[in-house]
């Protein structure tokens, strides 16, 4: 079984939750994935942050998390970065969230590394 984390690796390369706080991004009306797992076509359109595949087929299922919503991404140093969750998927390894900050920087983190805030602008 071959595991492909193309989107995860691309999102993690050069991204850090310890950068400067650019403020709260707007809650999007498009450009997110809800109710299904992401595909490579979603990545190309800019709707998804990562793709999880096993043997070339989508892996996992959508997580039961409201998409999109505001959140804090917690960095290793404890710094909270304001983000919008645009994708949530779960599989046997856990629940993974795709997020964007106000500058458009993308992040992938486990649910445990994120504080979900809901849809009301903080």
Image (spheres, rainbow, N blue to C red):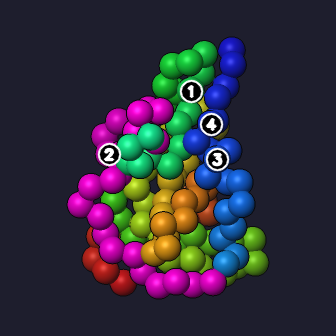
Query: At x 29% / y 64%, what residue is drawn?
Result: 28
Assign a secondary structure to mark 4.
helix
- Residue furthest out toward the right: 77
Q: Are marks 4 and 1 in contact (CB under 8 Å)?
A: yes
Judged left or right of residue 118, residue 4 is: right
Separation (CA) of disc 4 from disc 1: 9 Å
Q: Position of residue 89 (x, y in %)?
A: 47, 42
The reply to whether the C-beta atoms of the residues labelled 3 and 4 are less than 8 Å apart is yes
Q: Which label sits on residue 117?
A: none
Does the magenta run of residues contain 96? no
Q: Which residues are magenta?
A: 20-43
Q: Is residue 3 left or right of residue 119?
A: right
Where is residue 97 shown, x and y percent of the image? 51, 52
Q: Residue 34: which numbered mark, if any?
A: 2
Q: Residue under circle 3?
A: 10
Return the residue found at the far left: 29
Disc 1 packing (10 Å; few <14; some 14–19; many ≥20)? some
Residue 53 vs residue 60, the one in the foreground:
53
**Number of the front mark, 4 or 1:** 4
Marks 4/2: CA–CA distance: 20 Å
Looking at the rendered image, the quarter that the C terminus falls into is bottom left
Residue, disc 4: 6
* Mark 2, secondary structure of its residue: loop
Q: Kindly report the distance in space between the C-alpha atoms of the residues bearing marks 2 and 3.
A: 21 Å
Secondary structure of residue under mark 1: strand
Q: Quadrant of residue 5?
A: top right
The one nearer the camera, 101 or 97, is 101
**Circle 1 is placed at which residue position?**
53
Nearer the N terminus, badge 2 or badge 3?
A: 3
Q: Nearer the viewer, residue 72 or 38?
A: 38
């Amino acid at each position: 079984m071959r595991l492909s984390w193309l989107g995860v690796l691309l999102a993690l390369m050069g991204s850090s939750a310890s950068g400067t706080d650019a403020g709260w991004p707007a809650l999007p009306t498009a450009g997110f994935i809800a109710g299904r797992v992401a595909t490579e076509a979603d990545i190309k359109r800019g709707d998804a942050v990562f793709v999880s595949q096993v043997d070339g087929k989508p892996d996992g299922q959508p997580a039961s998390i409201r998409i999109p919503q505001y959140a804090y991404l917690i960095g290793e140093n404890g710094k909270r970065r304001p983000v919008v969750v645009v994708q949530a998927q779960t599989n046997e390894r856990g629940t993974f969230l795709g997020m964007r900050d106000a500058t458009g920087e993308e992040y992938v983190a486990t649910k445990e590394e994120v504080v979900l805030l809901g849809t009301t602008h903080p």
